[in-house]
């Protein structure tokens, strides 16, 4: 019964809709629904209809009511003292026949982010609504301010922080990023630049109003020290936890940006987290390409996409910060801020409107994240290929958060689908990345490396091959030796 009715209207069961009998005219709640639909994913309002749990009752409207309601509707929606923005065209409001009776149908599209918030009255803080499964609700002031911020075409993370200097950057983070950049872009002209010039090219720094160099928001978040980041973003917090079912154990492992023994920035957080998450994705030995074992497959790349997307799309003024929880084979990644495109565009892929494109670009230079908007598509495709449970996406408008829930397991060998990237792409695959890069990345994450560990991670059978590689890196000035005899280890050389 209900499906047949919706079919007549060309609506689906999950279509957003609001039915009102409208016997006494246009109610205030109609305008709340208009605001909520416009600020969420759009929807359809039906006047002259009552919706029940499993059916609809069509009371209908008289011709006189239809004419009056249309006139009243356009009069109110075009009055900016009553409604901030009219996003409708004539064809969005029209009478239709249902079960032989007249009904007024109002189709409200989702407003473009440039038009949000769509609010009632003259105070957006008191008249902005959104919609979820419980119905229309009044937005918090924090949510309204976030909508206003998202109106800007100039990226929020491109803002130059005039009152700050380049001392906000963590030296080890900048050094680690440059080493990784150099390994992935050998011969690139940026490699010869001084740090301040490199940071300018990266758009991590720019000239301030006094003509001096200051960090951009993207640069501060990506490569800065956490205690300096919180000067600008008081709610900034990155939290990664590994939990278990034992209630007596709070967590098996935890790292967060306030620990103080590491930078606490996005770049270092990503690498600390992704390496621990990768460890639980079991890869069978049969994963080979041209006789070389592949230890990172497209699942790893997709998992990296999920983390990078959360960091690049987050609203860092929002509450609670980034939260990543791994419990057994379940991974939850949650970030403050809503998506800036429709859900349809989000799931379709190929369309991206990141809140922090500068951060995404910095990730992109070291082959993390998607600049073309296909990151979500890659995640869904990778999980589907493995036959794992589909990723779940939760968009909470009341709490202003986006959450992705993933389940991982044993990777199944899929000929031809081992690597979603092309052969020419630089990636973390052993074939594509030099042994030097593997050692440098290990030292960056762990502080130092010894000969035995270097032999293990490079896949050498004897230490003689490792010794030649280490000596080469020492001669290049990339590493320095610490200690003697069995206690010898190697660290990044500080220039």
Image (spheres, helix red, strand yellow):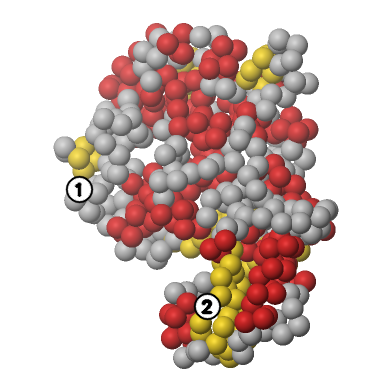
Please determine whether, in this image, residue 193 is positioned above or below residue 353. Answer: above
x then y, percent, for residue 394: 56, 62
At 45% from the left edge and 37% from the top edge, which residue is drawn? Answer: 371
Mark 1 touches mark 2? (CB < 8 Å): no
Q: Disc 2 designates what residue?
A: 96
The answer to whether residue 122 is seen in the rendering is yes
Position above or below: 243 against 12: above
Q: Which mark is residue 252?
A: none
Residue drawn 30% across the image and 58% down it: 385
**Mark 1 neighbour density, 10 Å: few (under 14) some (14–19) many (20 or more):** few
Q: Position of residue 236 (x, y in %)?
A: 71, 42
Which of pointers 1 and 2 lies earlier in the amino acid sequence?
2
Task: Find the distance from the CA under tag 1 to the CA under tag 2.
Answer: 52 Å
x and y percentages locating residue 125 in the rendered image? 81, 54
Q: Name the residue located 69 percent from the left edge and 53 percent from the top edge.
A: 85
Q: For the C terminus, which image quadrant?
A: top right
Which residue lies under the disc numbered 1? 416
- In depth, the one of 121 and 468 nearer the eye is 121
């Amino acid at each position: 019964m209900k499906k047949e009715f919706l079919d007549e209207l060309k609506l689906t069961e999950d279509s957003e809709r609001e039915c009102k009998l409208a016997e006494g005219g246009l109610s205030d709640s109609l305008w709340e629904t208009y605001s909520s639909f416009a600020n969420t994913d759009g929807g359809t309002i039906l006047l002259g209809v009552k919706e029940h749990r499993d059916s609809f009752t069509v009371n209908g409207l008289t011709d006189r009511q239809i004419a009056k309601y249309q006139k009243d509707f356009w009069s109110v929606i075009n009055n900016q003292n009553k409604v901030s923005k009219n996003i409708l065209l004539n064809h969005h409001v029209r009478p239709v026949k249902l079960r032989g009776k007249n009904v007024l149908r109002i189709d409200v599209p989702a407003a473009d982010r440039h038009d949000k918030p769509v609010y009632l009255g003259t105070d957006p803080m008191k008249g902005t609504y959104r919609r979820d499964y419980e119905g229309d609700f009044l937005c918090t002031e924090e949510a309204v301010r976030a909508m206003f911020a998202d109106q800007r075409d100039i990226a929020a993370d491109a803002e130059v922080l005039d009152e700050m200097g380049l001392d906000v950057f963590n030296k080890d983070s900048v050094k680690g990023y440059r080493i990784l950049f150099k390994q992935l872009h050998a011969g690139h002209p940026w490699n010869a630049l001084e740090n301040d010039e490199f940071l300018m090219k990266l758009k991590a720094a720019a000239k301030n109003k006094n003509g001096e160099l200051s960090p951009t928001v993207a640069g501060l978040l990506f490569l800065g020290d956490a205690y300096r980041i919180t000067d600008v973003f008081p709610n900034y917090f990155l939290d990664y936890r590994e939990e278990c079912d034992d209630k007596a154990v709070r967590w098996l492992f935890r790292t967060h940006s306030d620990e103080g023994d590491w930078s606490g920035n996005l770049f270092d957080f990503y690498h600390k987290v992704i390496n621990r998450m990768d460890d639980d994705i079991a890869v069978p030995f049969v994963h080979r390409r041209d006789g070389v074992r592949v230890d990172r497959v497209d699942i790893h790349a997709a998992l990296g996409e999920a983390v990078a997307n959360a960091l690049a799309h987050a609203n860092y003024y929002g509450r609670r910060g980034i939260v990543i929880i791994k419990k057994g084979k379940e991974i939850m990644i949650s970030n403050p801020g809503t998506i800036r495109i429709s859900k349809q565009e989000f799931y379709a892929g190929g369309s991206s409107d990141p809140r922090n494109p500068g951060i995404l670009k910095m990730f992109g230079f070291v082959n993390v994240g998607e600049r073309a908007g296909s990151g979500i598509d890659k995640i869904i495709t990778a999980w589907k290929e493995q036959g794992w449970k589909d990723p779940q996406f939760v968009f909470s408008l009341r709490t202003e958060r986006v959450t992705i829930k993933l389940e991982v397991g044993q990777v199944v060998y899929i000929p031809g689908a081992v690597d979603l990237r092309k052969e020419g792409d630089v990636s973390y695959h052993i074939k594509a990345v030099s042994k030097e890069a593997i050692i440098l990345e290990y030292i960056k994450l762990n502080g130092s490396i010894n000969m035995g560990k270097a032999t293990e991670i490079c896949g050498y059978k004897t230490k003689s091959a490792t010794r030649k590689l280490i000596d080469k890196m020492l001669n290049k000035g990339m590493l320095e030796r610490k200690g003697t005899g069995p206690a010898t280890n190697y660290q990044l050389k500080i220039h």
